[in-house]
Image (cartoon, rainbow, N blue to C red):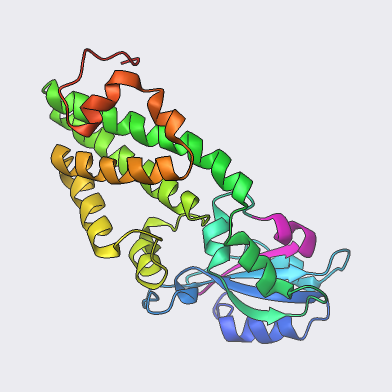
Amino acid sequence: MASPQQPLAYDAFVALAAADPAVVGLVLKGSRAHDGMATEHSDHDLYVVVADGATTELSRLHGHRSAILDIIVLPLAEFRTLGMPGFERYGLARGHVVLDRVDGGTGIAGLLAEKGRLDADEAFREAGGLVDAYANSVYRSVKNDRDGQPLAARLDAADSVRFLLELLFTLDRRPRPYNKYLEWELARYPLAGWETGGLLEAVGRISATGDVAVQRHLFARVEACVRRAGHGEVLDAWGEDLALMRGGAGPSPSRPA
């Protein structure tokens, strides 16, 4: 093991873990698992997957953190459900398999693939709430812009981008990437029906300026997409307030302020 003067090195730890019969998988996530994203400041985020019921001396390194290496040690049963749902889901979905000794099925790689694909029913349920959250933020942003509240309008516009990206990836049955990896993800795995450059330009402009014209143009694209996916009734519940989001003057607000 490493000493205080000699931090635990990634390659040395991988060799140590691979020699341990209790270890059935090693998964690297984060910048080191995304081609071209690692920098001189990037550490190695490593999951050590242990056979259910097995014991290993490596467990004492669970939670180890350094500028070089972060370690999480967990049993296979816990790894199967990690991020399902949860913040870790995207990171694991794009994780790199360093070691796979899981018998049966498709092993560790198969578990990562499962994390990268939302179940159809799960995606449909989540998308409905995200449609409403996105519409709510767009509505509030446009209304605040109309009413002479520029800061509130920009903040609501930025919120709308968060919900929009969650929605679009959910409709594509994929976990949304962390902001750091959004451009990386879309360059390699574009969203079906969306031109990557135009989408990124639009969300960047909306986040930075709250541009109402861009918001309305994007909302029109999203509305068509949402209705094709079977969530039209969520938008219809907004009634006459849809006019303000689409570009009409609209009546007095009928949703809670």
Please state the horizontal and vertical placement of residue 228, each as a whole percent of the image.
43, 45
Whether residue 31 is visible: yes
Q: Quadrant of residue 108?
A: bottom right
Whether residue 146 sits left or right of residue 33 in the image: it is left
Q: Residue furthest front?
A: 228
Q: Is residue 59 magenta?
A: no
216 vs 97, nearest the viewer: 216
Q: Is residue 218 above or below residue 70?
A: above
Q: Is residue 144 left or right of residue 90?
A: left
Instruction: Say above or below: 186 vs 238.
Output: below
Q: Quadrant of residue 23?
A: bottom right
In the orientation shown, which residue stands out farthest toward the right?
53
Does residue 246 lie above or below 21 as drawn? Answer: above
Give the residue displayed 63% in from the left and 67% down from the top. 112
Quarter holding residue 181: bottom left
User: Which residue is found at the position 22% from the left and 33% from the top?
Assistant: 246
Report the front residue among 242 and 167.
242
Percent position of residue 225, x then y: 38, 46
Note whether residue 149 is visible. no
Where the C terminus falls, by quadrant? top left
Write the start and end of the magenta stretch as one range: 68-82
The N terminus appears in which quarter of the rendering? bottom right
Find the residue positioned furthest to the left. Answer: 148
Q: Is 235 left, or right, of 18 in this rendering? A: left
Q: Residue at x 73, y 84 (%)?
A: 18
Image x and y of residue 123, in percent: 56, 47
